[in-house]
């Protein structure tokens, strides 16, 4: 498959028609490059707060409520685009008030996976950053899951989740071949933490990782006002993959798609015959520690 990760700027929309046109343009650009699976960033859904006006978008709590309220419109647009182009899309994550996932009345941070036939499911963020915990009160949601698709077995680690090796390992042990990492970071240091985590997950799981960040300024929504990053697709720096582990990447802080061809066969081959076998040797860590 051809995998596309977005470096995505948050945009103001006066109405849903502008939102639909914008998403159609972005999806169309990736499809024109042959993409089969498109990955949008964490908190890309916060741009939906603009549909409720400047006052709502400028308030931390009101922006959460507004983005969640308008999310069904975004979902319908992305479902239509996935069906029209015959592609899979991990939509921009954003707040969802789901009492089944978070009974306390606070939102989870949720990314939805769309296929050509409709919604395949969603993934909620597992471990919250200090800002989410201490200021925004966005909470952890439902458990990790692996999505079986015609393109392969996919897992999702939302931003900070990619910095924790046991989460990535759980997905790999459940059969994930490709990990999708949408992110939203406001400093180069924050972006680098997620980048290093994503590359480490590719190394230790001997899998492919697609990293899709927000980029640019969004001064009308203080929760996501500054965004740093570059989209990239990583693999293990070993047999059949680039020596750097970087299959594709965009320029720093510039909007666009990173696109690369990835293959389940290549992942199986490096796991079986690589110069190192991190995927197979993982359990030796605990064996050595307990010896």
Image: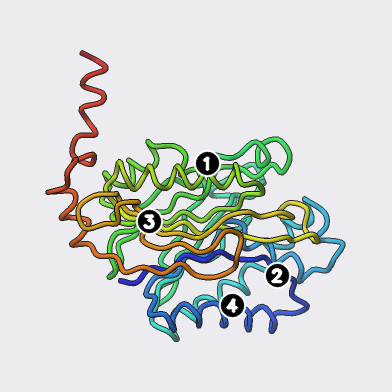
User: Dot 2, how many residues are within 10 Å of its Cα: few (below 14), some (14-19), or many (20+)?
Assistant: some
Left-right relation of 253 to 223 = left
User: Dot 4, how many residues are within 10 Å of its Cα: few (below 14), some (14-19), or many (20+)?
Assistant: some
Front position among marks 3 and 4: 3
Disc 1 versus disc 3: distance between alpha carbons? 16 Å
- In terms of sequence position, does the residue under pointer 4 or pointer 2 come before the other? 2
Disc 3 versus disc 2: distance between alpha carbons? 28 Å
Residue 59 appearing in the image: yes
Question: Helix or strand or loop: what does disc 3 sit on?
Answer: strand
Give the residue at x 71% y 54%: 226
Quarter of the image for residue 265 reads: bottom left
Disc 4 versus disc 2: distance between alpha carbons? 11 Å
Please give the residue where the numbered disc 3 appears in the rendered image: 246
- In terms of sequence position, does the residue under pointer 3 or pointer 2 come before the other? 2
Q: Residue 193 carries which label?
A: 1
Please give the residue where the numbered disc 4 appears in the rendered image: 23
- In terms of sequence position, does the residue under pointer 4 or pointer 1 come before the other? 4
């Amino acid at each position: 498959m051809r995998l596309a990760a977005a470096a995505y700027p948050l945009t103001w929309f006066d109405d849903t028609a502008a939102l639909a046109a914008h998403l159609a343009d972005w999806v169309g650009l990736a499809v024109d490059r042959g993409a089969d699976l498109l990955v949008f960033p964490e908190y890309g859904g916060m741009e939906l707060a603009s549909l409720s006006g400047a006052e709502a978008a400028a308030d931390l709590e009101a922006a959460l409520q507004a983005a969640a309220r308008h999310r069904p419109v975004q979902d319908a647009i992305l479902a239509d685009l996935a069906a029209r182009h015959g592609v899979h899309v991990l939509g921009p994550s954003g707040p969802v008030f789901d009492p089944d996932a978070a009974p306390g009345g606070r939102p989870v941070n949720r990314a939805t996976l769309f296929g050509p036939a409709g919604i395949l499911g969603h993934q909620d963020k597992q471990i919250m950053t200090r800002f989410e915990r201490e200021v925004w009160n966005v909470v952890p949601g439902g458990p990790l899951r692996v999505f079986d698709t015609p393109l392969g077995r996919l897992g999702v680690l939302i931003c900070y989740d990619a910095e924790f090796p046991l989460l990535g390992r759980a997905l790999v042990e459940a059969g994930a071949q490709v990990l999708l990492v949408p992110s939203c970071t406001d400093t180069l240091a924050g972006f680098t933490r997620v980048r290093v985590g994503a590359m480490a997950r590719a190394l230790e799981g001997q899998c492919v990782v697609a990293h899709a960040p927000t980029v640019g300024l969004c001064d009308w929504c203080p929760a996501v006002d500054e965004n740093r990053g570059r989209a990239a697709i990583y693999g293990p720096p070993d047999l059949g993959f680039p020596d750097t582990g970087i299959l594709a990447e965009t320029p720093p802080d510039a909007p666009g798609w990173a696109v690369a061809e990835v293959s389940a066969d290549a992942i199986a081959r490096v796991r079986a015959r690589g110069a190192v076998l991190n995927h197979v040797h993982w359990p030796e860590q605990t064996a050595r520690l307990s010896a």
